[in-house]
Image: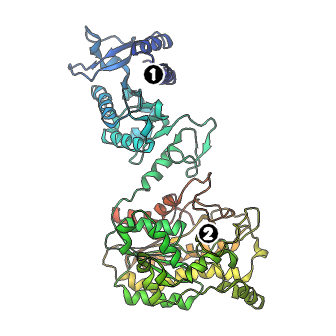
Amino acid sequence: MTDIRRHLPLIISCLRRQLAQQSSVEASRTELGKLLPASYGINAGSLQSAQGERSAPFEIVIYDKTIPSPQAECEPAGLDIRRALAVIKLAQAADMDTLAHSIEAIASAKRLRPAIPIMPEQLKNPSRVLSKLLPLGIIIVQQLNDAKNYDQEGLILGLDALLKDQNALLRPDFLLVPGSQLSYQNPLFEQAPFSETTINIACEPALSRPRSCYVCKQRFTRRHFFYPYLCLPCADLNYRKRTIPLELTGRCALVTGARIRIGYATALRLLRAGAHVIATTRFPHDAARRYSSEPDFAEWQERLQIYGLDFRNLPVLEHFIAHLQATYSGLDILINNAAQTVRRPVQYYAALQAGEAMSLSTLPAEQQLLIRQSHIALPAPAFPRAEEAQRLFASSPLALAQADESAALAAPITGREVEPVPPHNGDQPNSWTLRLDEISLSEFLEVQVINVTAPFLLISRLRPLIRNSSFPERFVVNVSAIEGQFAHVKQGSHPHTNMAKASLNMLTHSAAADLATDHIYMNSVDPGWISLQTLDPESTVLPEGLPLDLVDAAARICDPIFTGIQSGKASSGQFYKDYQAASW
């Protein structure tokens, strides 16, 4: 049998060229006839089964002339299905109705194939299956429906939904939308089975040089429409995980370090899933401003409470825990996100401190409601002046711990009279680049207290409150990092933060089984590479070159929760990286 797969690149290239030249269908058939071997026949019309069933008509049909027809083909529209190698449908526009019609046309041809069983295990070895999938189905979209208002992501998601509505063995094998620089290819042609998460729609042109996937490390050239540093299968999975899969209505979650970046994105994800969220931060006024600026703030503002506290002040943290025990009947989710990674000087937060010093009554009413409970229940976080902090530091290496920032990397409030200090220069050393003998005792202790002691207190002291949850599954997520993995090679820098993350992982590893007896499921999660610690953290826009964004980080953190509820089989005692359990 003629192997059509060997000639597919030539066929696709010819169709692209003919489309770019706006050639007629007849000209395209003629050109294909010149390029392909003499054993290939080019025709148009429908396919027909031995039982007389017919497919939808096609503008181009490629068939094997070396296979004799078992029946008389009196008209071109009735080409025998057993001779067909490929059918090509030319769609006029990239609207959903036209695409759905074209996909169904391909399916009508594939349904005529003689019944040859394909076992599930064969799909794991695609090269053995491809010959059973003939004729191959190709769709070429000739123009965009509305080029001026073209929405690439919307087109991809709509097309993906249409493909998944179709039986996997009846889907098109190739779909090209040249005007949008998009292409779809059956994953079986890449030796990969079609899975629930597969979209497999790539951007064109392909990479000129293979790139290593951030997740699986495999080399790839076909570019994903959203993730430039992930291969198509990994990118499709990560993109699917960005959606919120279920509601958390009625559940109450505590998220620490929730003012900006990962913690902020995680709190938003939980709020948008319907949960009530208790958020902690050193700068509650600024946090209230940020949350209230969200476009959907009105939909969840009544389910958000913000508390201002500094985790280095352990008596205040214990007071906060007592307040939660007295105020809430149960807690369903605890996410320990707050962590100090890079220490900043006091002056760095001058503008933020000025905002926090303002009276509660000066804030807009909706922001006041978010932090009113914090003002009632807790003392306001203390902010020593820079000169006072320097004087204290001279007498005690630990005193500066009461004057520096803790978990979050702050972004100055605009419009204040106090000017922020210049942003950090990535060429200058900071906590992330320090070696063992360069780390001060005060910074070392700060990191351990914030990153380890505070989560320990929250988990241990709030266990009865979490046990009181009315839901069958309760969750604790400790936000970790590969820096805390013993299996990950270290380079000698920031050993104090590595130690803290390793300690947090050991807390998960040691206590998870015990907590599981109360149906409290605790895991550690690496949120992925979404920041560069040597660059200025104040920017709200992530630098180019990072494989993931804040939505990805929040999705990874929340995944053990959503997956555990959805499956009814919550995991416990795992370290998750890239949505998979990884070694410690």
Mark 1 vs 2: CB contact within 8 A: no
Colour style of the rendered protein structure: rainbow
Residue 221 is left or right of residue 242, and the answer is right
Q: Which residue is mark 2?
A: 484
Q: Label 1 amino acid?
A: Ile
Q: Is residue 216 above or below residue 439?
A: above
- Categorize mark 1 by other alpha carbons within 10 Å: few (<14), some (14-19), many (20+): many
Residue 426 is left or right of residue 149, and the answer is right
Q: Which mark is residue 204?
A: none
**Nearest the camera: 80 or 468?**
468
Give the quarter of the image for residue 392.
Answer: bottom right
**Nearest the camera: 33 or 389?**
389
Which SS class for mark 1? helix
Where residue 143 sits: x, y (%)?
A: 42, 29
Where residue 78 sits: x, y (%)?
A: 26, 15
Q: CA distance from mark 1 to mark 2?
A: 51 Å
Which SS class for mark 2? helix
User: Residue at 71% of width from left, 66% of height from top?
Assistant: 424
Q: Label 2 amino acid?
A: Gly
Q: Which residue is mark 1?
A: 4
User: Residue at 51% of width from left, 69% of height from top?
Assistant: 263
Q: Is residue 404 above or below residue 242?
A: below
